Image: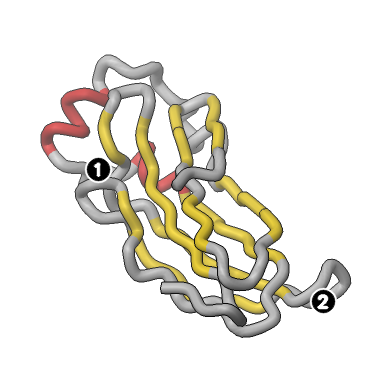
Amino acid sequence: MSTETTASVSTHILDTSIGRPAAGVAITLTARSGGAAQWTALGGSKTDADGRCKDLPTLPEGTTHVRLDFETESYFIDDRSTDQQAEAKQDAPRVRDSGAFFPEVAITFAVTPGEHYHVPLLLNPFGYSVYRGS
């Protein structure tokens, strides 16, 4: 929900190497008010079974920049993946034994009060892309 004084943010992750949502990825939300201001950690969550993160913290009034930090390493090396994801990952390229090629993904973007920003992450073991969704 957005108001005239704040923006709102949502995200989801699709693992393009297996064509399925990426469940259980930790996401941290930070924000600042102005390009020279310090970043303030607002909290975080994890993606659900559908790869969506529906409970990110509300942005404070005056927020101009937002950063989403995705902890991708544990997703690619986590032995606790669902059976379906683990089976699909067997056909995906193997990541280095020391961890994921991109152990984290940080996406920083500008926001305008009153607007909603849906920022999906398309993820695979050796690359990623993002865009402003709807």
Determine contact: label 1, label 2, CB under 8 Å: no
Check the image and report above or below for 29 versus 3.
above
- Measuring 62% from the left and 50% from the top, which residue is drawn there? 107
Q: Nearer the viewer, residue 90 or 28?
A: 28
- Disc 1 designates what residue? 79
Q: Nearer the viewer, residue 67 or 82?
A: 67
113 displayed left or right of 12: right
Instruction: Tell me, yes or no, if residue 90 can be seen here.
Output: yes
- Measuring 35% from the left and 59% from the top, which residue is drawn there? 53
Please report whichever mark, 1 or 2, sits nearer to the chain's N-terminal start. Answer: 2
75 displayed left or right of 28: left
Q: Nearer the viewer, residue 104 or 1?
A: 1
101 displayed left or right of 53: right
The disc at residue 37 is 2
Check the image and report above or below for 64 versus 124.
below
Residue 79 lies in quadrant = top left
Secondary element at image label 2: loop
Which amino acid type is shown beneath numbered disc 2? Answer: Ala
